[in-house]
Image (tube, coloured by chain):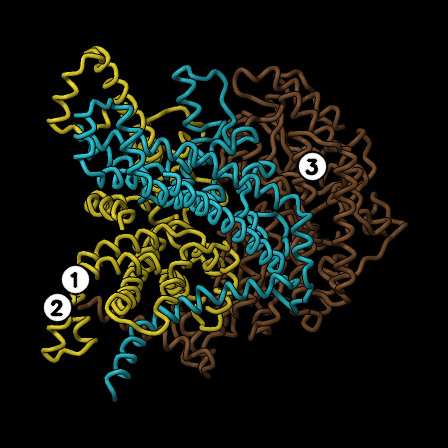
Chain colours: A brown, B yellow, C cyan
């Protein structure tokens, strides 16, 4: 009998739901269900007024304990009765945001990264913050307002906090064992070193090189990107001077990767490796070197404690000459406000709190990211995380202008080059094909008015932001 | 092998024995080979499951370096950790909720439809049956998820698990056909007698016929439950904006990327055990039913 | 109210939930797809009518046709291993041997386990650097070097093996049901006529099993063409697209999996791909249907 009532109730629900299609109580329903499913921290109902509920979404996991702490403090101390609820998303962050905005569940405050900001602005997700910026803040962040990074069509959408530098991560013990004195500065050296390490260590399952090739784009965007920018080329295949895609420099780098694969210097199974299993293998002393972000020291401190001696060094370049600057990535943006938020003022108050000197300083000192805001850089101490010294911003690091992100027909550059790397093909044809497809997608996007591209013939890779 | 396949009825056996061609030795070899094959297949079938159980009791380090078949020292704490820290309590509740609702809903919707289709004639009946049958065969893949999602947004069901539940119920054609078969077995005279006694159509269905259908409902329910419990892609897409709503399958597969930045395979294995266990228990209890129904589906 | 109207009302009431659910959540999405396959639509903003552009792109989309090829390879491999194996098991278990029902229970067990969950497990045990499969094979001296099970050379084989693991029990049971419906007296009279085991299998078991086998094959073909869940979990279609099947390719157009930077959803083109995939599966099913009918006439 119980089943019967359950079922009947269900069918009524359905009928009611469908009838409610054109109903009038839209917002009420969605809010009610929201409240129920959130199950966040219960806050004592204030007698004055309803608290303002803000949702903050991020896909950062490495700093979540600290961010939670900050949010709890904000919730307790702010005088405007604002309650922030943190949601840490997983791998599908961008899709989740897309779905949220198309279904009226958008968060009020979003973590922005340089890879997704232009996309979010394009889709109208973000509200400009120019109106809120105080003179102090303008002064503090002014030098870091960059077109197409955090400023679009003259409007500012986010502010800088930290950036990620990228380095070659290498196992000092294995290098010493193979008789190599210092990390490679040219790609040829990298190929040779990988081979030497493999020769010495193969019997114990030790290999010279690895990357998380399960997703070639993630693998190359943390390695080749850096090799190229330090060699004087934009790291995602875009040519700043012509305003077109040109994968010719990219194809030069790939040749060396292919050589390492041919030599058998790459960890077997790397084709299906995710980044965390790779780190686990590195921590176990099975990998000579790989390239990655400045998040690595924190990861080896917390998640994969290791006894090996390792360090970060500048990435190798095409010919051993440094003709460009190592790109600081995911810089220039941190938090942004949703255009659909009903509480943009409150969201800004939260943002202002998060961008306070103390928060930014501690963020750097705890090693979650490398501070790039000048006033913070001056006062913050360097994090004492082991291995961090190799990742700190130096003379060869700088911010680059953003490259347009396009979706070409067919496979992306990383998949195409990775295929060449581990099987076969004609590199010239692949490069020409990529150039054609990427530039076609670029001109289509420009035609649609999604963004504008201005060639900069005077672009200098050693000073990417000009003077 | 074929020889072994013969139905071993006494009569046939006698005849076989009478034939001189295959020696006793050949028979023994054949039998041994057959058993080797059967046991090897059984071991291969159980292997992943045994690996899951042994992995769930290893430490993270043991799991990462690989090598040993069994844990050095069983870590039962993995389970409590998975349950609390990796959020499996929440995932389990979501899975239970979805599966029970889907089972109840599917049974109700399909049994009502199957009853009418089996007992009565009405215009468009063959169209209805054809549509239900073709729903089982047309497959356009994930593209349907978008319009389904848009609909749920319109109905404001996208922030709850009801969207997933309704979509799973909407795919009730196989239950419909299964139940139709069961209705056929219930004599029509029963309905007629009840009607004559003044029982209305609806009352007859819920009071007289449904109770008789309970074995059939149990069977169909088991299958609907299994389907809902194991569903992956639908809840994956629908809970992307709401990690709180993830079901076991989704939460578990997401662990591949690491819920707290590091991949914790030992917890993942514990989670896998937690998610496999209920179905496995149901299977052990209702093994016969599963097997009979699956077998029955080709006889019709 | 007249009797007729009352009956109609009752019918409608009972069919209403089923019809409305099927129409709204089953059929409407199909029409949605049929509409948007003529549009350029990224999931936000305006959808742009582009006529047959999506189909032109489909024609020159090497990745899609590669995925179609992979689908055939995956389905073919799965069927070639699953069907004989499950038939063999069914035939053996049909002879009532000791422990038969226990074995049957074991073989069928994979069908109650979630594909996604067990695929996560398979992903970890097939790893080349620390997976249990390699460790065991090395210990048993069957291989000397770890095999790169998920690498470009073997990944397809691996996902096929996983699929076979999940399917054998199911088809074994279906065959078993078919076998058990063959009347025993047929065998008896054949034995009396002096037919040996091989002949009896060829001349009684196979033809009597044919109707069931035809249906089982049909189910198996459709299931193997459609399946992509386990591939999605194990390899995400990689490495270098070696295990990309068409429904996974479609899924990735709509929900780009774990990419570093955003890739726009391609709903218009995805609709065209969905339509083409359904058409391909439909054509194969139809072809099979046609051929098996012809076979019936031959018999």
Residue A63 higher or lower than A304, as above or below: below
Question: Residue at the location (19% across, 44% down)?
Answer: B288
Question: Residue at the location (64% across, 16% down)?
Answer: A178
Where disc 1 sits, the SS reads: loop
Task: Determine which residue is flagged by label 2.
Answer: B190
Is A337 or A104 nearer to us in this picture? A104
Assess whether mark 2 and mark 1 are in contact (beta carbons under 8 angstroms): yes
Whole-percent x, y for residue B4 in the image: 23, 24
Where disc 2 sits, the SS reads: helix
Question: Closer to the camera: disc 1 or disc 3?
Answer: 1
Q: How many marks?
A: 3
Q: Tell me the tag on residue A417.
A: 3
Task: Determine which residue is flagged by label 1.
Answer: B186
How far apart are the alpha carbons under marks 1 and 2? Answer: 8 Å
Q: Quadrant of the N terminus of chain A?
A: bottom left
Q: Is residue A437 left or right of residue A109?
A: right
Q: Is residue B244 left or right of residue A457?
A: left
Give the letter of the chain under mark 3: A
Task: Please tell me how crowded label 2 is: few (under 14), some (14-19), or many (20+) other residues with Cα within 10 Å.
Answer: few
User: What residue occupies the far right of the structure in this picture?
Assistant: A458
How far apart are the alpha carbons under marks 1 and 3? Answer: 65 Å
């Amino acid at each position: 009998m119980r089943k019967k009532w359950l079922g009947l109730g269900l069918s009524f629900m359905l009928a009611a739901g469908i009838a409610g299609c054109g109903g009038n109580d839209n917002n009420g329903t969605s809010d009610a269900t929201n409240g129920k499913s959130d199950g966040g921290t219960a806050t004592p109902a204030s007698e004055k007024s309803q608290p303002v509920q803000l949702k903050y979404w991020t896909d950062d996991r490495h700093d979540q304990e600290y961010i939670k702490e900050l949010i709890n403090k904000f919730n307790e101390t702010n005088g405007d009765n604002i309650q922030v609820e943190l949601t840490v998303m997983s791998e599908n962050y961008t899709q989740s945001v897309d779905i949220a905005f198309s279904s009226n569940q958008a968060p009020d405050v979003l973590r922005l990264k340089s890879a997704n900001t232009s996309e979010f602005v394009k889709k109208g997700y973000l509200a400009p913050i120019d109106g809120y910026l105080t003179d102090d803040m303008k002064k503090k962040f002014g030098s870091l307002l960059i077109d197409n990074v955090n400023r679009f069509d003259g409007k500012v959408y986010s502010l800088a906090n930290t950036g990620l530098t990228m380095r070659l991560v290498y196992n000092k013990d294995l290098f010493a064992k193979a008789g190599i004195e210092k990390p490679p500065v040219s790609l040829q050296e990298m190929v040779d070193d990988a081979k030497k390490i493999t020769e010495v260590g193969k019997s114990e399952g030790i290999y010279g090189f690895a990357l998380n090739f399960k997703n070639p784009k993630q693998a190359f965007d943390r390695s080749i990107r850096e090799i190229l920018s330090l060699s004087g080329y934009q790291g995602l295949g875009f040519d700043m001077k012509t305003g077109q895609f040109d994968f010719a420099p990219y194809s030069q780098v790939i040749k060396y990767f292919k050589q390492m694969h041919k030599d058998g210097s790459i960890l077997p199974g790397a084709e299906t490796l995710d980044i965390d299993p790779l780190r686990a293998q590195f921590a176990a002393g099975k990998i000579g070197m790989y390239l990655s972000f400045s998040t690595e020291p924190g990861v080896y401190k917390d998640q994969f404690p290791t006894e090996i001696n390792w360090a970060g060094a500048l990435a190798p370049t095409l010919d051993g000459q440094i003709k460009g600057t190592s790109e600081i990535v995911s810089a220039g943006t941190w938090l942004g406000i949703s255009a659909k938020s009903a509480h943009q003022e409150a969201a800004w108050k939260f943002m202002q709190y998060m961008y306070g000197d103390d928060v930014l300083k501690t963020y750097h000192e705890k090693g979650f990211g490398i501070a790039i805001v000048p006033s913070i850089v001056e006062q913050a101490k360097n994090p004492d995380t082991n291995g961090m010294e190799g990742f700190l911003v130096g003379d060869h690091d700088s911010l680059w202008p953003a490259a347009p992100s396009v979706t070409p027909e067919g496979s992306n550059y990383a998949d195409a080059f990775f295929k060449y790397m581990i099987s076969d093909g004609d590199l010239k044809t692949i490069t020409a094909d990529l150039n054609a497809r990427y530039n076609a997608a670029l001109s289509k996007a420009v035609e649609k008015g999604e963004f504008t591209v201005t060639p900069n013939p005077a672009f200098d890779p050693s000073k990417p932001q000009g003077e | 092998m074929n020889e072994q396949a013969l139905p071993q009825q006494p009569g046939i056996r006698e005849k076989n024995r009478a034939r001189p061609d295959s020696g006793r030795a050949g028979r023994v070899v054949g039998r041994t080979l057959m058993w080797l094959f059967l046991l090897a297949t059984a071991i291969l079938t159980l292997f992943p499951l045994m690996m899951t159980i042994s992995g769930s009791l290893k430490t993270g380090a043991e799991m990462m370096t690989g090598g040993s078949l069994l844990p050095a020292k069983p870590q039962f704490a993995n389970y409590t950790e998975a349950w609390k820290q990796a959020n499996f309590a929440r995932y389990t509740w979501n899975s239970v909720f979805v599966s029970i609702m889907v089972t109840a809903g599917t049974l109700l919707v399909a049994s009502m439809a199957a009853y009418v289709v089996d007992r009565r004639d009405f215009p468009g009946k063959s169209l209805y049956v054809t549509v239900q049958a073709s729903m089982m065969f047309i497959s356009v893949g994930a593209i349907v998820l978008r319009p389904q999602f848009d609909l749920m947004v319109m109905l404001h069901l996208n922030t709850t698990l009801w969207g997933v539940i309704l979509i799973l119920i909407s795919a009730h054609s196989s239950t419909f056909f299964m139940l139709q078969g069961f209705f056929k077995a219930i004599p029509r005279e029963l309905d007629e007698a009840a009607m004559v006694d003044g029982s209305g159509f609806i009352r007859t269905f819920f009071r007289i016929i449904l109770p008789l259908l309970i074995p059939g409902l149990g069977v169909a329910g088991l299958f609907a439950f299994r389907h809902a419990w194991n569903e992956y892609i639908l809840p994956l897409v629908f809970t992307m904006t709401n990690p709180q709503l993830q079901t076991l399958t989704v939460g578990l597969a997401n662990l591949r990327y690491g819920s707290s930045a590091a991949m914790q395979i030992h917890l993942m294995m514990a989670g896998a055990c937690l998610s496999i266990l209920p179905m496995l228990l149901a299977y052990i209890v209702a093994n016969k039913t599963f097997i009979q129904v699956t077998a029955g589906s080709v006889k019709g | 109210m007249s009797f007729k109207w009352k009956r109609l009302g009752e019918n409608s009431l009972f069919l209403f939930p089923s019809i409305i659910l099927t129409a709204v959540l089953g059929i409407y999405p199909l029409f949605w797809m049929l509409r948007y396959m003529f549009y350029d639509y990224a999931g936000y903003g305006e959808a742009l009518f582009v006529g047959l552009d999506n189909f032109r792109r489909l024609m020159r989309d090497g990745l899609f046709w590669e995925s179609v090829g992979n689908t055939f390879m995956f389905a073919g491999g799965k069927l070639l291993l699953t069907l004989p194996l499950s038939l063999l098991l069914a035939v053996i278990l049909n002879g009532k041997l000791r422990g038969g029902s226990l074995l049957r229970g074991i073989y069928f067990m994979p069908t109650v386990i979630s594909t996604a969950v067990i695929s996560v497990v398979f992903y970890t045990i097939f790893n080349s650097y620390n997976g249990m499969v390699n460790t065991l094979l090395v210990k048993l001296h069957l291989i000397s070097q770890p095999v790169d099970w998920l690498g470009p050379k073997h990944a397809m084989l691996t996902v096929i093996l996983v699929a076979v693991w999940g399917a054998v029990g199911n088809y074994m049971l279906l065959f078993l049901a078919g076998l058990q419906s063959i009347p025993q007296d047929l065998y008896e009279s054949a034995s009396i006529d002096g037919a040996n085991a091989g002949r009896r299998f060829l001349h009684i078991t196979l033809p009597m099993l044919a109707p069931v086998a035809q249906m089982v094959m049909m189910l198996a073909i459709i299931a193997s063409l459609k399946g992509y869940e386990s591939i999605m979990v194990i390899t995400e279609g990689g490495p270098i697209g070696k295990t990309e099947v068409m429904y996974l390719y479609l899924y990735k157009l709509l929900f780009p999996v774990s990419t570093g930077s955003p890739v726009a959803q391609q709903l218009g083109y995805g609709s065209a791909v969905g339509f083409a995939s359904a058409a391909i599966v439909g054509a194969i099913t139809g072809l099979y249907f046609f051929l098996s009918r012809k076979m019936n006439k031959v018999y």
